[in-house]
């Protein structure tokens, strides 16, 4: 009776566990075999990723002090403003935020710009290094000029 | 089609049962008989080793029992160097009591039980317990009886001489050819001193056994009756054993006739032990087989697991470098994801796309995390919405303000297809926010 009630269910459970373990091992072996086949592509992928990271490094502002980073972001924005002949009307105080491993500095600016300089200004920001990400941009036509505001964000690594 | 029943019918259950019964059957004491490796025959107070034909006379010492004297002589006949011998003792046929039986339609077991129950009435001359030996495969025949105490005394005496007394049998049966499977009828005349025993044996079954004292035959009446009785017995061969020389001609270990062997209690006890040991071995073998059957799937799984683990180790070895690289890629993605995945709104391209549709009708433009609001003037704002909605780079295109001036002024809101700030903010939530 004990054999029927206790031992047999235990044996069946143990047998099922064995099957599950075999299933798990088979799946893992299958994945690893696939990895063996993929190995040459992974090498290429890693090389590409390293190049990508090297490029991304130039996008970041350096330093751990958020005020200094804010100053660098503002400086970078001013440089684009000057090159695009944008007339700045005001710069707000930079806003600092943190996400996992990163400091994000956001800078707002109001400006006046000629129509022919709008795309140039945006292109300068797009290609700026360290990079300024345009998060908000607005312009209003006012006779021959445009008035507007822009918000850009710069990244700095915390470690 | 049902194969179950025919298959079951094919299995010889009865034969299997009989085989199993024979394996554990204790009644015929086959185990103990199989171990017999010497036979000693008593004739005229001399004990003969039937294989070596050597003999010694039994002369009891003062206060020595006859059984002890016989055992002492037996010791002389059996070399100590051969280890403990298992002996078949062949005693004069006249030493055994006999009764005839006729029990039609009764099984072998029942015949034996019936005879044992009737032993007191069948042989009233004996007060002591008797052992029974009978071939009860036939409904009629002769049952032999032997004094149980005498058998046990002999066993004890032989045991003291380190000889195992396996069985006691009437010596006349030493003349039977137990290998001959035909039911040949044989007449055996066993004479010694004043006793004459006359047996009619068919195969290994005693049909008649007549015993008489020679002095009785001196009376004509008895002699005539004896002649009549003897003449009625027919046989294909007659063997007369009436001298020492006759018995010395055997020259081999006598094969016991199991049906007419008497076993002392000590011998039966040993046989039970042998049988138990045998049963135990069979039981252990059966248990081992069952355990093996029960665990066969587990063993199979275990072996397969071992194979899989070995294979896993092998492929793990092969993938050390690819896995290191994968981990490195993963780490880089983790480290740089927040920057790399930051949605790029490409505001310049958005303006160019809008201008292609609006043709200079735009008076204001704003973009905030992928949401674009535009306003301007056109003849048909609805058509403008339609045109913008057809472009892949926009979705959720809709008018955002009421039209004024007969439809010339418009306000439209749309979303950029290429950016998803919501997902980004969920993946990389802001953990702290300062000034």
Image: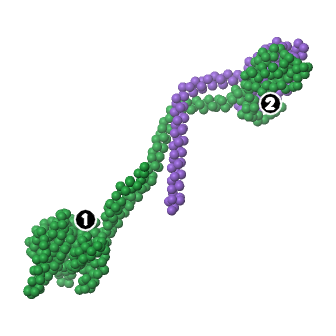
Asked if residue B49 is positioned above or below residue A139 in the image, the reply reads below
From the top left corner, tell me how far across and down residue B269 is, in percent: 31, 72
Asked if residue B349 is positioned above or below residue B60 in the image, the reply reads above
Farthest front residue in view: B1
Element at label 2: strand
Work out how far the residue at label 2 is from the one at label 1, CA to CA, in angstroms: 104 Å
Residue occupying the point 52% across, 29% down = A37
Quarter of the image where the C terminus of chain B is located: top right
* Colour setting: by chain
- Residue B178 shown left or right of residue A110 in the figure: left
Residue B22, quarter of picture: bottom left
Asked if residue A78 is positioned above or below residue B270 in the image, the reply reads above
Judging depth in this view, the residue of B9 and B405 nearest the camera is B9
Mark 2 crowdedness (10 Å alpha carbons): few <14, some 14-19, many ≥20: many
Q: Chain of mark 1?
A: B
**Chain A's shade in the image?**
purple
On residue B34, the disc is 1
Residue B117, quarter of picture: bottom left
Element at label 1: helix
Residue occupying the point 77% across, 29% down = A104
Is residue B205 among the parts visible in the rendering? yes
Which residue is label 2 attached to? Answer: A96
Residue B201, quarter of picture: bottom left
**Chain B's shade in the image?**
green
From the top left corner, tell me how far across and down residue B220 is, in percent: 8, 86
Judging depth in this view, the residue of B386 and B148 nearest the camera is B386
Is residue A150 among the parts visible in the rendering? no
- Residue B370 shown left or right of residue A56 in the figure: right
Residue occupying the point 12% across, 75% down = B189
Front tag of 2 and 1 = 1
């Amino acid at each position: 009776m004990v054999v029927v009630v206790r031992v047999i269910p235990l044996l069946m459970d143990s047998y099922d566990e064995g099957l599950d373990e075999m299933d798990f091992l088979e799946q893992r072996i299958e994945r690893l075999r696939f990895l063996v086949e993929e190995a040459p592509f992974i090498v290429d992928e890693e090389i590409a990723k390293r190049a990508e990271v090297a490029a991304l490094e130039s996008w970041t502002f350096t330093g751990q002090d958020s005020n200094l980073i804010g100053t660098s972001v503002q400086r970078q924005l001013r440089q684009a403003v000057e090159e695009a002949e944008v007339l700045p009307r005001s710069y707000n105080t930079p806003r600092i935020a943190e996400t996992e491993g990163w400091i994000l500095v956001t800078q707002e600016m109001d400006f006046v710009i000629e129509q022919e300089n709008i795309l140039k200004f945006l292109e300068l920001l797009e290609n700026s290094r360290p990079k300024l990400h345009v998060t908000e941009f607005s312009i209003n036509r006012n006779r021959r000029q445009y008035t507007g505001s822009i918000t850009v964000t710069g990244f700095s690594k915390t470690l | 089609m049902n194969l179950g029943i025919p298959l079951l019918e094919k299995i010889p259950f009865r034969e299997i049962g009989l085989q199993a019964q024979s394996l554990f059957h204790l009644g015929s004491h086959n185990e103990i008989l199989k171990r017999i490796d010497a036979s000693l025959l008593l004739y005229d107070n001399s004990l003969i080793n039937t294989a070596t034909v050597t003999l010694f006379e039994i002369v009891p010492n003062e206060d020595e029992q006859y059984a002890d004297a016989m055992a002492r002589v037996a010791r002389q006949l059996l070399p100590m160097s051969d280890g403990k011998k298992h002996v078949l003792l062949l005693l004069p046929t006249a030493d055994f009591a006999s009764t005839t039986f006729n029990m039609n339609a009764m099984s072998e077991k029942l015949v034996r039980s019936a005879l044992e129950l009737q032993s007191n009435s069948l042989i009233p001359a004996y007060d002591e317990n008797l052992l029974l030996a009978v071939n009860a495969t036939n409904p009629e025949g002769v049952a032999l009886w032997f004094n149980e105490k005498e058998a046990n005394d002999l066993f004890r005496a032989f045991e003291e001489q380190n000889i195992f007394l396996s069985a006691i049998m009437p010596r006349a049966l030493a003349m039977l050819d137990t290998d001959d499977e035909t039911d040949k009828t044989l007449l055996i005349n066993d004479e010694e001193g004043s006793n004459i025993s006359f047996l009619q044996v068919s195969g290994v079954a005693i049909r008649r056994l007549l015993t008489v004292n020679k002095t009785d035959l001196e009376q004509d009446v008895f002699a005539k009756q004896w002649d009549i009785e003897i003449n009625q017995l027919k046989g294909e061969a007659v063997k007369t054993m009436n001298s020492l020389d006759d018995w010395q001609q055997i020259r081999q270990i006598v094969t016991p006739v199991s049906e007419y062997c008497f076993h002392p209690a000590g011998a039966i006890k040993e046989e039970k032990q042998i049988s138990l040991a045998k049963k135990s071995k069979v039981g252990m073998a059966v248990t081992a087989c069952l355990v093996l059957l029960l665990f066969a799937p587990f063993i199979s799984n275990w072996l397969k697991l071992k194979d899989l683990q070995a294979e896993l180790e092998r492929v793990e070895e092969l993938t050390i470098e690819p896995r290191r690289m994968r981990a490195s890629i993963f780490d880089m993605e983790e480290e740089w994801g927040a920057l790399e995945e930051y949605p790029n709104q490409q505001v310049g391209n958005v303006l160019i796309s809008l201008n292609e549709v609006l043709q200079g009708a735009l008076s204001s433009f704003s973009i905030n995390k992928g949401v674009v609001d535009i306003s301007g003037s056109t003849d048909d704002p609805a058509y403008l919405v339609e045109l913008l909605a057809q472009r892949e780079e926009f979705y959720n295109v809709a008018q955002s303000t009421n039209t004024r001036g007969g439809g010339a002024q418009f306000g439209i809101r749309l979303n950029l297809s290429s950016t998803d700030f919501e997902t980004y903010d969920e993946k990389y939530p802001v953990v702290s926010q300062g000034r």
